Image (cartoon, grey):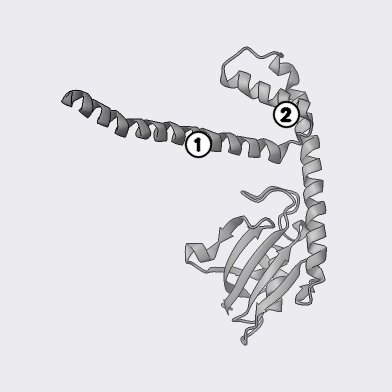
Amino acid sequence: MKKLLTLSLLTLFIAPFVFAQNQKEEETLYALGYQLGNNVREQFVISSNEEYKALSQGMLDSLLKRNPKVKLEDYQKAIQARYEADSKKILNQRKLEQNQVLTKIKKDKNSKELSNGAVIQITQKGKGKQPKATSNVKVHYEGALLDGKVFDSSIKRGQPAQFALNQVISCWTLGLQEMKVGSKAKLFCPPATAYGDNQAGPIPAGSLLVFDVELLGIED
């Protein structure tokens, strides 16, 4: 009886642990599936139930090592053509949505539109010198996409950045010339003033970038 009781207690402790482990694995796989879905969504426009069903079936057949229902090599050109067409649709939609947001930002009384189409908002006025286009500056900054996803931050690294203003994106070249040392500002950089229609690391093609910048010094 004592052994049975001990076994029952042991099972009582082990069962939740096994369940938790299984649940953790399921959650991990769910997260993986979600990320794979994000990757597809960022590159292709899947809009109808039929398209979702076909895509899901193809992924399931691949994961289960089933024989494909089509001759895969016959569809490589079609896949590439679909990728190129959908990429253009995604890019155009992204630009349309960003332009709508930027138009609203330009109407803000604290905004100043620069000659290249970028927008600056001074959030803290400094009292130091203003840099020139050829100046070497020292700054702290954080760059994010329009949805708030941070892609670069000297603040998180704990190390200010130093560079010549004529060696960076034009949004920064013009924007920082509007600032005095000690100033803080928010820079809104349309694709044409940043990385254009090309993907740059974690930055999707044609992205409007938002930078929080603090001008710490001029190192001329």
x and y percentages locating residue 76 in the rendered image: 73, 23
Give the numbered dot on residue 52. Answer: 2
- Residue 27: which numbered mark, if any? 1
Residue that lies at the very extreme toward the front in this rendered image:
1
| Viewer-nearest residue: 11 or 110 | 11
What residue type is disc 2 on?
Tyr
Left or right of 74 on screen, residue 217: left
Can you see residue 158? yes
- Circle 1 packing at 10 Å, graded few (<14), some (14-19), many (20+), is few
Q: Nearer the viewer, residue 84 or 22?
A: 22
The residue positioned 48% from the left and 62% from the top of the image is: 157
Q: Quadrant of the N terminus?
A: top left
Residue 129 in the image, given as x and y percentages of width and height:
63, 85
Q: Which residue lies furthest to the bottom in this view?
A: 127
Lateral position of residue 82 relative to residue 13, left or right = right
Say what secondary structure mark 2 lies in: helix
